[in-house]
Image: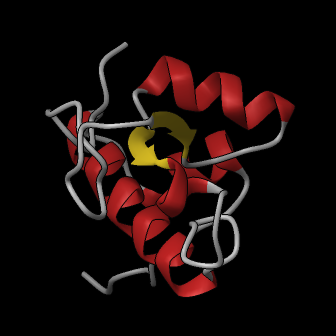
Amino acid sequence: MNSIVCDKKECFRCHTKNGLHKHHIFFGTANRKKSDKDGCWIWLCGIHHNLSNAGIHFDKSFDLEVKQLTEHKWLEYYDEDIDSFIKRYGKNYIEKEDN
């Protein structure tokens, strides 16, 4: 499936088109497969993926920012609620909004 987060094949962070890696937003064996199926992935260059301290695997704030954005996109794309997201991925990354 195409990404529900980005529509261009370029690094999500710096927009380069060189040396891209596919990064699954929600990882672990089961969640990586779900991320692939649901379109919860982005392109990252090596520097912003896992080849430097600026990479998403080492930068917790960047990782959380992308997880929160992706959760919002998932809720909108699949027209679901936060409880459905938690059931699918095991955790909520955004604060539950009061209605």
Residue 4 x/y as whole percent? 27, 35
Task: Specify the quadrant that holds the N terminus.
Answer: top left
The residue sitting at 62% across, 26% down in the picture is: 34
Query: Does 6 appear above or below 95?
Result: above
Along the viewing direction, whichever of 96 and 2 lies nearer the viewer: 2
Along the viewing direction, whichever of 14 and 94 lies nearer the viewer: 14
Residue 2 x/y as whole percent? 30, 19
Residue 40 x/y as whole percent? 44, 38
Display colour scheme: secondary structure
Of all residues, the one furthest to the left in this rendering is: 7
The residue sitting at 65% across, 78% down in the picture is: 53
The residue sitting at 27% across, 50% down in the picture is: 73
| Residue 48 horizontal side relative to residue 81, left or right | right
Residue 24 x/y as whole percent? 57, 39
Of all residues, the one furthest to the right in this rendering is: 29
Query: Does 54 appear above or below 42?
Result: below
| Residue 76 horizontal side relative to residue 40, left or right | left
Tally of numbered tags: 0
Along the viewing direction, whichever of 24 and 34 lies nearer the viewer: 24
The residue sitting at 25% across, 63% down in the picture is: 14
Residue 96 image-quadrant placement: bottom left
| Residue 27 horizontal side relative to residue 81, left or right | right
Query: Does 26 appear above or below 3?
Result: below
Of all residues, the one furthest to the top in this rendering is: 1
Task: Specify the quadrant that holds the C terminus.
Answer: bottom left
Of all residues, the one furthest to the front in this rendering is: 18
Along the viewing direction, whichever of 43 and 93 lies nearer the viewer: 43
| Residue 57 horizontal side relative to residue 9, left or right | right
Residue 66 image-quadrant placement: bottom left
